[in-house]
Amino acid sequence: KNEVEQSPQNLTAQEGEFITINCSYSVGISALHWLQQHPGGGIVSLFMLSSGKKKHGRLIATINIQEKHSSLHITASHPRDSAVYICAVDPLVGGGADGLTFGKGTHLIIQP
Amino acid sequence: EAQVTQNPRYLITVTGKKLTVTCSQNMNHEYMSWYRQDPGLGLRQIYYSMNVEVTDKGDVPEGYKVSRKEKRNFPLILESPSPNQTSLYFCASKPQGAVQPQHFGDGTRLSIL
């Protein structure tokens, strides 16, 4: 069974700090997703990756397929970045026919 | 605006009283899915549907039913809710077959007393 592990589970940082959230998975995948969930809010897709690196504003996502590892970076963090960040993968086999396997999430708090 | 709409957003009810959470999407997506989110467990798939009249179980289907009579709607039915179904529920959709991001609804927080 595919496992998706995220670290850290919780992270508190000061405004302006560089943030890194890590995600490791155990089986072959067709894509990896980074999702954001604000308190009381819905879930928004930030990135979908199958190789390399993607950047959107202050957010950068990287993936190393050989090492089965991805990182989400936030540069110049801001209190509005406070949210739960969830890593999810599309397994190559298994899963709920296109269903994602999710990590448990990283709860990020950015203090002013 | 492309969206997935869930109703209700919040519901407190009692054990055994049948309830339905509706989910509707306006993007003509074939694939729809229901997830529940619990502290320490993350998101887990309940049921999914690959198209009209095609549904299948996810990882935690016990106590739930779904139907897909129209492409846009995918209601989640709790015939006899129990306290262990207290959770935050999300509906999501995406085009079938392609590896694409799923579009999530805003969530429904259910409390079963």
Image: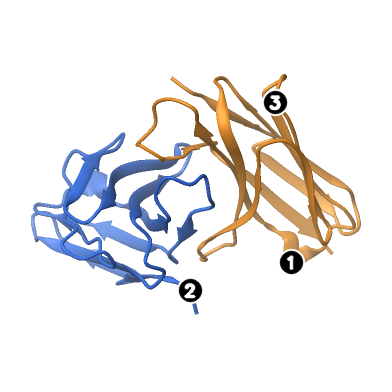
Chain colours: A orange, B blue
Same chain for mark 1 and mark 2? The answer is: no
Q: Amino acid at mark 2?
A: Ala
Say whether marks 3 and 1 touch (CB < 8 Å): no
**Quarter where residue B76 is shown:** bottom left
Q: What is the crowding at mark 1: few (fewer than 14 residues within 10 Å), some, or many (at least 20)?
A: few
Write down the residue under mark 1: A80
- Give the x, y percent position of residue B1: 50, 80
- Give the x, y percent position of residue B92: 40, 57
The residue at 35%/36% (across/down) is A96
**Depicted B85 relative to depicted A40: above or below:** above
Q: Secondary structure at mark 2?
A: loop
Q: Amino acid at mark 1?
A: Arg
Write down the residue under mark 3: A65
Query: How far apart are labels 2 and 3 at the CA level?
Result: 32 Å
- Give the x, y percent position of residue B62: 18, 38
Farthest residue toward the bottom?
B1
Relative side of B71 to A68, left or right: left
**Quarter where residue B22 is shown:** bottom left
Write down the residue under mark 2: B2
